[in-house]
Amino acid sequence: MAGGRRGLAAMAILAVWLSAATQGQEQAALPAEQSRVQPMTASNWTLVMEGEWMLKFYAPWCPSCQQTDSEWETFARNGESLQINVGKVDVIQEPGLSGRFFVTTLPAFFHAKDGIFRRYRGPGIFEDLQNYILEKKWQSVEPLTGWKSPASLTMSGMAGLFSISGKIWHLHNYFTVTLGVPAWCSYVFFVLATLVFGLFMGLVLVIISECFYVPLPRNSSEHSDQDQRSEEAHGVEQLQDAEEDKDDSNEEENKDSLVDDEEEKEELGDEDEDEEEEDNPGGGVDEEKDDVSGQGPKKEGSMTVKEGEPDKPGEDIPEQPRPASTELAEDSLRQRKSQHAKKEP
């Protein structure tokens, strides 16, 4: 009896093992469910320029990106009913695309409709994504136009910069992780490479400028020199004319001042004569007496004067000194005449 029971238990265990093995083989024979999310790269990203798309930018190390993976897969499986294509971009593998869309936060979602791109800022939940498409909420979002558009020339240059930075990052990891080079050695290498590359590009620009530089002909240079000379001569003539105008105005002022000085002289002379007449009221009688007494005996060939007789009238009256104001006026008049004579050619 004990042997029969053991045989039955062994048969039961064998049956369970066989059933489990067959189920495992059936599950292995079934193909894994294929993902409906299409990976986007720098070579096939132009597909989003046609039709309606939703793109997700993610990184494998990003926890928020991992939380939305299942929701994004569900949204992609319903893409056929929503008549929309769903894609994803790994920013680690495709830094150029992240630069083209100028992705600064992860995860980042974009909606594309016939080449017009909009940024989706809602949560990455299936229901919100579905309502965003069905209710056409994207129409109320401002599109990325002009230089912000991923298809613009500016964003193409940004994509190139991001791709170069990604290659540098991979190279740095190769130096530090694979080869075991210290980090500061890698930094020194990149600094020297940047300096050498900058000098090389400067040399290339100089060569290009020398090749495409067209020197000006001699005739144009001569004409330019003549024009400069004529402009200088014209400027000199204008200065001379201005100086002549100033001289003319100065001459007129001098003439006016001379006329004023002469009038002052005449007035001063009249005043002096009046003062002399007032000071010498008997001058005429004395002169007559001098004339009478001056007549005396004369010798041949000479004239003698008696002792005690007064001299001639012209010799008796001493010259009176001129006023200081008249002398100053005459001096100023002479100086102005001399200046005017020097200015005249």
Image: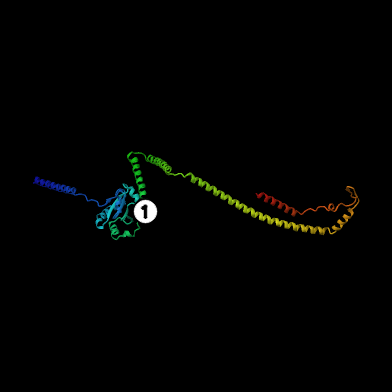
Residue 254: percent from the left, percent from the top?
68, 54
**How was the colour assigned to the protein in this rendering?**
rainbow
Q: Say which of 319 and 117 sits in front.
A: 319
Q: Is residue 98 visible?
A: yes
Say left or right for 159 vs 9.
Answer: right
Q: Is residue 66 visible?
A: no
Q: Say which of 61 and 75 sits in front.
A: 75
Q: Residue furthest left?
A: 1
For residue 129, which quarter of the picture?
A: bottom left
Say left or right for 314 vs 43.
Answer: right
Residue 342: percent from the left, percent from the top?
67, 49
Say left or right for 110 vs 317.
Answer: left
- Secondary structure of residue under mark 1: helix
Q: Residue furthest bottom?
A: 135
Residue 130: percent from the left, percent from the top?
28, 58
Q: Which residue is mark 1?
A: 148
Q: Is residue 196 above or below residue 108?
A: above
Report the number of numbered marks: 1
Residue 212: percent from the left, percent from the top?
42, 44
Q: Say which of 2 and 267 sits in front.
A: 267
The residue depicted at 71 percent of the width and 53 percent of the height is 333
Badge 1 amino acid: Lys
Q: Residues within 10 Å of mark 1 (few under 14, many from 20)?
A: some
Q: Residue furthest front?
A: 300
Q: Say which of 324 and 6 sits in front.
A: 324
